[in-house]
Amino acid sequence: MRATKAEMTTNKDHAEAAFAEFFDVEFAGQFRRAVFLLRDRGAAEDVVHDAFVEVWRRWSEIAEPGPYLNRCVLNGCRDHTASRRRRWTHDRTTRVEQHDAAADELSDILARLPFNQRCAVVLRFYVGMSNDEIAHAMGCPVGSVGPWIQRAKQQLLKELT
């Protein structure tokens, strides 16, 4: 049984409307999370955009697009951080980030944490996720999350005192 052209158009319109609604609900939070992780608004925008493109490509296949989008954004941030570190190591130069007046000591300390620790802290204290949710979002064992957060808190405390 083949769908008529009108039915295919209706299905496409419905999918586009559902995706547009999903985008409107998710974009701001995903963008803020990526900015916290990358400390670069332009890179965060690129990562989140690429993640939404990936979700759209698989929109009809994904049962739960929210967790899939979270994973895409986190993986994009991880990849961006790793490629930036490789570029820095390769060039042997440091790149001075432009900070606005709102940048503070805590933000600088967070930036120095290893990616997994920074990510776990942002997801726990900024997003409010549980250890299980963080592990699912990061694609890691639940047992890794607690130690990452604990080490990050110890480092934050040490540098802030």
Image (spheres, rainbow, N blue to C red):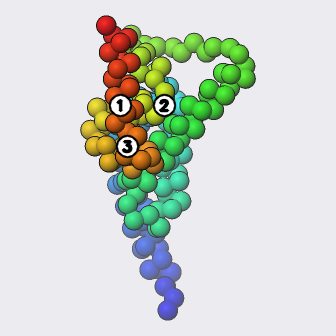
Callout 1 amino acid: Ile
In-front residue for pair 86/14 = 86
Residue 27 position by quadrant: top left
Q: N-terminal of the two: label 3 or label 2? A: 2
Distance from the alpha carbon under mark 3 to that under mark 2: 17 Å
Mark 2 or 1: the one toward you? 1
Mark 3 or 1: the one toward you? 3
Q: Are marks 3 and 1 in contact (CB under 8 Å)?
A: no
Circle 1 — which element?
Answer: helix
Distance from the alpha carbon under mark 2 to that under mark 1: 11 Å
Q: Label 1: how many residues lie within 10 Å, few (<14), some (14-19) or many (20+)?
A: many
Left or right of residue 88: residue 3 = left
Residue that mark 1 sits on: 149
Q: N-terminal of the two: label 2 or label 1? A: 2
Write the residue at 62% across / 28% down. Answer: 84
Residue 137 seen in the figure: no
Q: Are marks 3 and 2 in contact (CB under 8 Å)?
A: no
Callout 3 amino acid: Gly
Residue that mark 2 sits on: 115
Callout 2 amino acid: Phe
Picture layout, residue 102 above or below residue 70: above
Residue that mark 3 sits on: 143
